[in-house]
Amino acid sequence: MSELKTAEPTQAPFAGKPGAHEHPVDFNSYLRRCVYVFVAVVCAVSLMLVASYLPAEHFNWAAKVAMILAIACTNAFVVAGFLMHLISEKKMIYTLLAFTVFFFTGLMGLTVWAMQDFPAGTTH
Amino acid sequence: MEIPYAVHPRPDTGIYNAKVGIWLFLASEVMLFGALFSAYVLLRVGAPAGEWPHGWLNVTLGTVNTLVLATSAITTLMAWVACKTRQFGKFKFFHGCTLLLALTFLCVKAYEYHDKWIHYEIHLTDGRIADGHLRARDAGSITIEGRYVTDEKDLYDLRAQKDIQTGEIKIPRSQIKQMENYGPWHNTYLALYFTLTGLHALHILGGSIVIGYLWGPGRKLWKTDPEHFTNRVEVSGLFWHFVDLVWIFLFPVLYLT
């Protein structure tokens, strides 16, 4: 039975910092981290709710949307960074995500770029 | 033949193959949901002023579901930590909690869908519109819990309207010109709402099946190869966190803006 051919151990273009994220896992410190993250998420959700109910006379719709999305992005950063370990991942994952960010930005950028081409009357 | 690097990291990447695989899959998922979000932006910006619905969804239920999903993300991570520290009892507890929370999320979503399903907009022959939740129907009439409006635009921005008076309305079928419930066919907003949340709910269902498998029949791998099992828990956890991330954006976009 032949073995699958794999890369030589000496070639390590994506390995990143050796030993990163390989430290021993401590149950209690993770539990503490999770409590902090949960509190942060609750705060973010509360802030989004407050922002959505801000009086329309002082804050126009665009400002409110920008505020809410900024809070949502912060919330997503906390979840991705601490729960998905993205703050201490391998270079390979960052490379992959860099491509994703590029294409996602392109997708959203093209949508905004085509602002003048939007179809009108899309309610129904 | 044993599949290489299912347990130990590849020397060149520093990670095991399943983790590369799930991140590639998540990258494709970002593009899938990104396309739907860009469709939302396109249609939202193209809507005439004052004609995009506001306050049609129950913010309290949306907030509850946000917190339920955030808690499940925590329990998923703790299940992985329990595996890493070789505490299988705690793994079973935390993954069991994740399953219950996923079920809670789906039940709340099903309730919200049902609420829209029995919500009707009824155009009458005299030009008025009756809007409300269906309570009873028979051969001669329809009974709803709702109100009358004269202009359809009065139904768009519910957050701007204070103290909406509703009551039981019995409408003879002979007076009904057109009747439609708040399903995905009702308007663009609801089409987007059902598409985005429906796809998200399918992801919750898929993730629950995988987590349920690891919690149930799949856990026998723990006895023979605990590290391999731990890696499977990590991969399923990454997917679950992604589903949570999608909801972090869906909630404000659909419920709050």
Image (tube, rainbow, N blue to C red):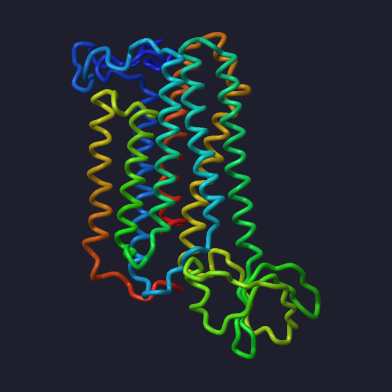
Which residue is painted at 53% across and 74% down in the image? B155
With respect to residue A98, does B155 lie above or below?
Answer: below
Q: Is residue A122 above or below residue B235?
A: below
Q: Residue at x 51, y 71 (%)?
A: B161
Q: Nearer the viewer, residue B195 or B49?
A: B49
Drawn side of residue A51 relative to residue B225, left or right = left
Q: Quadrant of residue B128?
A: bottom right
Q: Is residue B119 above or below residue B217?
A: below
Above or below B204: residue B212:
above
Residue located farthest toward the bottom when viewing the structure as drawn: B126
Q: Position of residue B127 (x, y in %)?
A: 59, 89
Quadrant of the snapshot with the C terminus of chain B: bottom left
Toward which corner of the image does residue A83 lie, by quadrant? top left
Residue placed most toward the observer, A119 or B49: B49
Q: B128 or B200: nearer the eye?
A: B128
Q: Where's residue B120, x and y in %?
A: 63, 71
Instruction: Tell whether B211 sits left or right of B247.
Output: right
Q: Residue at x 42, y 38 (%)?
A: A41
Question: Is residue B245 toward the left or the right of residue B151 in the image?
Answer: left
Closer to the camera, B232 or A56? A56
Q: Quadrant of the N terminus of chain B?
A: top left
Say which residue appears at 42% left-offset and 30% top-offset. Answer: B238
Q: Position of residue B60 (x, y in %)?
A: 55, 51
Return the x and y of residue A26 as percentages of the image width and height: 42, 12
Relative to residue A21, is residue A27 drawn left or right? right
